[in-house]
């Protein structure tokens, strides 16, 4: 099983370094919150480690049954996308529950205000 070619390794290293720099820049500009950056940062560092450490990439390729390292990087890329989707699905589910609860509380408060106004108007008659 061959490792990555020099060109593949160079591209993977530059992409990983670029991703890490981009994540830091997005956090610095407050475009990305820290709580969402950990998975992106972990991915950039993992690609960097796998691109530099040929033996680890070869071992992982053997574990997943691949005879070629580049598909292993692709496989872990797809796994990353699945984890990101799962993270966002959990976050969206939490937000949906919060929105429902807030809507119910708002409706109750509006009804309470309406009842108090009616009581005041009846008392003033």
Image (cartoon, helix red, strand yellow):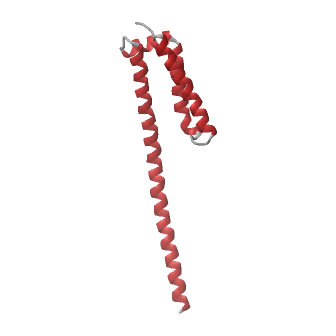
**51 lies above or below 34:** above
Residue that lies at the very extreme toward the top in this rendered image: 1
Q: Nearer the viewer, residue 32 or 14?
A: 14
Count of numbered circles on the image: 0
- Give the quarter of the figure containing the N terminus: top left
Q: Nearer the viewer, residue 31 or 49?
A: 31
Q: Residue at x 57, y 28 (%)?
A: 20
**107 lies above or below 73:** below
Q: Residue at x 57, y 42 (%)?
A: 31
**100 lies above or below 28:** below
Q: Nearer the viewer, residue 23 or 90?
A: 23
Q: Residue at x 46, y 38 (%)?
A: 87
Residue that lies at the very extreme toward the front in this rendered image: 7
**29 lies above or below 95:** above
Q: Locate residue 35 relative to residue 57 in the image: left or right.
A: right
Q: Residue at x 44, y 51 (%)?
A: 96
Q: Nearer the viewer, residue 30 or 115?
A: 30
Q: Position of residue 125 (x, y in %)?
A: 53, 93
Q: Locate residue 68 relative to residue 53 in the image: left or right.
A: left
Residue that lies at the very extreme toward the bottom in this rendered image: 125
Q: Position of residue 6 (x, y in %)?
A: 49, 11
């Amino acid at each position: 099983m061959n490792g990555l070619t020099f060109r593949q390794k160079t591209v993977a290293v530059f992409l990983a370094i670029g991703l890490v720099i981009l994540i830091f820049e997005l956090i610095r500009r407050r475009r990305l919150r820290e709580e969402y950056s950990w998975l992106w940062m972990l991915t950039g560092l993992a690609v960097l480690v796998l691109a530099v450490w040929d033996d680890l990439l070869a071992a992982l390729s053997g574990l997943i049954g691949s005879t070629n390292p580049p598909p292993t990087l692709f496989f872990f890329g797809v796994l990353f996308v699945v984890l990101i989707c799962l993270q966002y699905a959990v976050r969206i589910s939490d937000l949906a529950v919060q929105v429902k609860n807030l809507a119910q509380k708002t409706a109750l408060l509006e009804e309470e205000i309406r009842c108090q106004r009616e009581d005041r108007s009846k008392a003033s008659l």
